[in-house]
Image (cartoon, grey):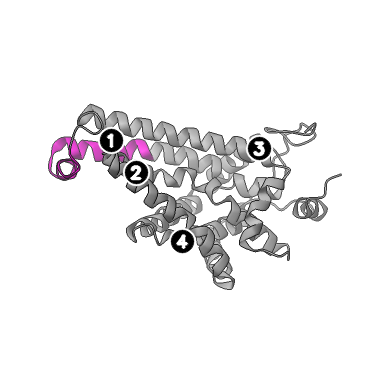
Amino acid sequence: MSNVHVFAAPNHSLAYPTVHRIGVHDVRDALREGFDDFLNNPSHLVFLGFIYPTVGLCLAFWTSNLNLLPLLYPLISGFALIGPFAAIGIYEISRRREAGLDASWRHALAVIRSPSLPAIAALSVALTVIFLLWLMTASSLYQWLFAPLGAVAPQRFIADVFTTNRGRDLMLLGNASGFVFAATAFCISAVSFPLLLDQDVGAGAAVFTSVHAVLDNPLPMLAWALIVDAGLAIGFATLLVGLAVVVPVLGHATWHLYRKVVASPPAEARYLWVTGVQD
């Protein structure tokens, strides 16, 4: 516990990994490699992936029972905000497979032994806060334009959203504010979680590197963000069942994209993180 560190590396320094410039073809290659990883051994990943549609269906049941239907769309769309750390177990499987180690669904829990765990936890909390702020914003918009939550029948709410001016205002303002939250979360988490699994650089350096990666590669990262959104939309359109495939594939592809964007650590350093051995 004496070596617990969050924002900096173990030696209390902020060492920023080198960020490479990539092209849209690299994003395509990362997605293809993600599919290949999934197809090589899909059973473990489907098991992990089914966690996400199960949680989503529970949320849908919970909101319908409490007459909180207006929050269902923000809850589902907000998945993209917390998705990067929700898929961290998939990154760990990718990391182990790349290192030539055994990689089953049980190894997704190996992240708890990572030396970067405090930094990972701090970033997870940050994304959760962004997610909660998004829900609060969505709730406030609804209550401003419509009524207190639960005051309007679900059937009436659905009809009003698509047929009234206030419904169109809700969709416009809601999606505009959601874009701000999504862009913020994407910038700080695009590669930060895979980076922390791969290199113990601290949360500060991981966030800086992630933002740097997005700003240095605006078009490829925009393409990647659109692919993620499209994949999640497909997952939700299939009544969340599709997430059992979409999430693992995107998780694998995220790891490969990280490898293309961020310079790899020295071989000896990577060995320490992979094996869990520390000096």
Q: Residues within 10 Å of mark 2 (few under 14, many from 20)?
A: some
Front label number (1 vs 4): 4
Q: Do the residues labelled 1 and 2 touch (CB within 8 Å)?
A: no
Residue at the location (62% across, 57% down)?
260
Q: Nearer the viewer, residue 150 or 214?
A: 150
> Residue at label 3?
119
Type of the residue with mark 4: Ala
> Residue at label 4?
244
Disc 3 and disc 2: Cα gap in Å? 32 Å
Type of the residue with mark 1: Leu
**Residue 170 belongs to magenta span:** yes
Disc 4 and disc 2: Cα gap in Å? 21 Å
The image quadrant that residue 94 belongs to is: bottom right
Residue sitting at the far left: 163
Q: Do the residues labelled 1 and 4 touch (CB within 8 Å)?
A: no
| Mark with earlier residue (3, 2) | 2
Chain part drawn in magenta: 153-178
Q: What element carries label 3?
A: helix
| Mark with earlier residue (4, 2) | 2
Front label number (3 vs 2): 2
